[in-house]
Amino acid sequence: DTGVSQDPRHKITKRGQNVTFRCDPISEHNRLYWYRQTLGQGPEFLTYFQNEAQLEKSRLLSDRFSAERPKGSFSTLEIQRTEQGDSAMYLCASRFVDRDDNEQFFGPGTRLTVL
Amino acid sequence: SQKIEQNSEALNIQEGKTATLTCNYTNYSPAYLQWYRQDPGRGPVFLLLIRENEKEKRKERLKVTFDTTLKQSLFHITASQPADSATYLCALGRRAYGQNFVFGPGTRLSVLP
């Protein structure tokens, strides 16, 4: 399967714990995006990378959130000291920047539940 | 403030009819607009893109229009089928190099047999 993959698919944690999610984009894609989606809402932009450089972060992203893409391939999103309000689906998407239609390819998401 | 709205939260139509979904935005100047389909528990899947200088785009049973004066896009599915039942999201593409995508809340479409 050559699509975007995310791991884990589900994560249940207690408030105050740290969690880390992984995203493996489509191999030739140079842009990688992280989104958060809650029930009944569209995906909300968190941050994106061009190769290994993190080019933009949402103002909504608190200091407890950090993302990396160390070698321009897979990416990790870490949430420290989780809060119940962090419960959501975390989506990763990738694309090749010179594609004319700007199509993003989304992974299946990681569903986080903070108890 | 900036806002994206998509018609109603849910839309029910009869099989074979044309479904029309709307995406309205305020205080944005998108370079383009995309439509995605999302099934429960899955990530969105890209359907169509329309640029600011285009009025209409078609792909098979799908048609998208874009009116930058009205700040509105319409998404049509003709000859709808129960398999078209899903949530449909519009996404605005920023003009700037960063090219963030801003998504609307989505419309849940149910096509009844």
Image (cartoon, grey):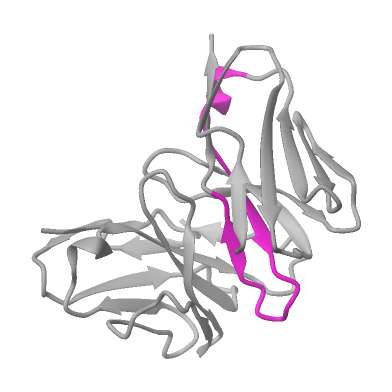
Does the magenta portion include B68? no
The residue shown at (61%, 18%) is B81
> How far across and how far down the image is residue A47, in percent?
48, 77
Residue A107 lies, with reference to residue B87, above or below; the image says below
Residue B34 lies, with reference to residue B94, above or below; the image says above
| Residue B71 appears left or right of A27 | right
The residue shown at (69%, 46%) is B24
> How far across and how far down the image is residue A73, in percent?
47, 81
> How far across and how far down the image is residue B28, in percent?
71, 64
Does the magenta portion include B94? yes
* Res B75 quadrant in image: top right
| Residue A23 appears left or right of A50 | left
The residue shown at (50%, 60%) is A2
Residue A70 lies, with reference to residue B11, above or below; the image says below
- Number of labels in the image equals 0
Which contiguous range is marked in magenta? Answer: B81-104
> How far across and how far down the image is residue B102, in percent?
59, 62
| Residue A76 appears left or right of B63 | left
Residue B75 lies, with reference to residue A20, above or below; the image says above
User: The N terminus of chain B lies in which quarter of the figure?
Assistant: bottom right
* Res A115 quadrant in image: bottom left
Instruction: Specify the farthest residue to the front.
Output: B1
B93 or B61, which is in the foreground?
Answer: B93
* Res A31 quadrant in image: bottom right
